[in-house]
Image (tube, rainbow, N blue to C red):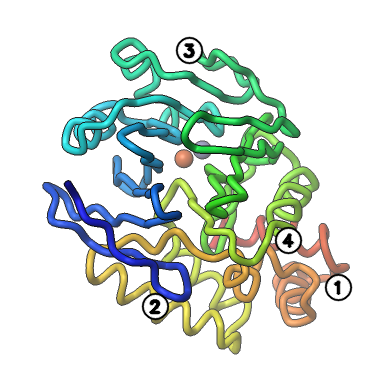
Amino acid sequence: MVRYPEPTPDGSCLETLPLSKPYSILRTTMTMQAVALPAFRDNYLWCLVHEGRALVVDPGDAAVVEQWLKEQQLHLSYLLITHHHADHIGGLGELLERHQPVVYGPDEGIAGIQHILRGGEALSLDGFGHVDVLAIPGHTRAHIAYYLPEPALLFCGDTLFSAGCGRLFEGTPAQMYQSLQSLAALPDETRVCCSHEYTEANLHFAAVVEPDNRSRQARSEEVALLRAAGKPSLPVLLGQERRYNPFLRCAVPAVIQQASQEAGQALGAGLATFTALRAWKDRF
Ligand code: ZN
Ligand code: FE
């Protein structure tokens, strides 16, 4: 039986265990753990484990999930999908056929989803408790997030990243801005489980937007150490993100000023600044 590390006071509690891969396990409650399974180049397939049962968010690669299930001798109970991109659903069909999990996901024409969610639903998942579903369109048309208030975990797919946010493929800046605002309204202690390890690149951009931001500097140092040790930079506390993620700081004078300078016109706080920042990041 694997022993899980005690949580640290800041709740980060990431430690490498002697498994075939250096997985980082987060103990979320006395009996529930979360693990970020690395996949492809920079994806994380998030897995919650409770008493031998697994819940996987965005199973992009079936083989990665299979290996973890086998190694830990877990039964796959649930699959939660955030949006339709291949790196998030690629393993769905195979896992569904082999393990018959219950599958939840958005209304984006994804094969294999048994329960379509649009946001606003409250799920009760056996062994994993209460899950709130949030509509967060922008990256895709019907992107959703899953928030577990009890272990304070947020699975937000490709919408909120550490120090950044997702690209606008199907939605408008206004939708994405609203989506980020609704995520930012969750409690400070929420641990944000993003689907990609984009943190370092995002921090480079954040450094240009807010060169003097001390919290950003501290986060850059922290992430450099984590990545050098082969550990994920995630999850990250939402309260921490609000202090340096430029996309959550569109009402901060320094951010507005920098975005205005780049855009060549005086921008208003909020949506106008967000729109300019997102466009700037696209060409950064
Ligand atoms: Zn995506
Ligand atoms: Fe993705």
Q: Relative to 194, is 21 on the left or the right?
A: left
Q: Nearer the viewer, residue 275 or 126?
A: 126
Query: Mark 3: is the Cβ under 8 angstroms from ligand 1?
Result: no
Reading the chain from its start, which is encountered first: label 1 or label 3?
A: 3
Q: Nearer the viewer, residue 105 or 88?
A: 105
Residue on which the image places disc 3: 112
Reading the chain from its start, which is encountered first: label 4 or label 3?
A: 3
Residue type indicated by callout 3: Gly
Residue on which the image places disc 1: 266
Give the spatial CA distance, label 2 vs label 3. Answer: 39 Å
Q: Residue at x 88, y 68 (%)?
A: 268
Q: Relative to 94, is 266 on the left or the right?
A: right
Look at discs 1 and 3 and give the one toward the viewer.
Answer: 3
Res 275 quadrant in image: bottom right
Reading the chain from its start, which is encountered first: label 2 or label 4?
A: 2
Q: Residue at x 82, y 63 (%)?
A: 270
Res 224 quadrant in image: bottom left
Reading the chain from its start, which is encountered first: label 2 or label 3?
A: 3
Secondary-structure class at tag 3: loop
Residue type indicated by callout 2: Glu
Task: Point out which mark residue 222 bears.
Answer: 2
Q: Relative to 10, is 144 on the left or the right?
A: right
Residue on which the image places disc 4: 276
Q: Residue 107, how many percent across, how many down? A: 65, 20
Q: Nearer the viewer, residue 247 or 106?
A: 106
Look at discs 2 and 4 and give the one toward the viewer.
Answer: 2
Kindly indicate whether the residue at mark 3 contacts the one at mark 4 (C-beta within 8 angstroms): no
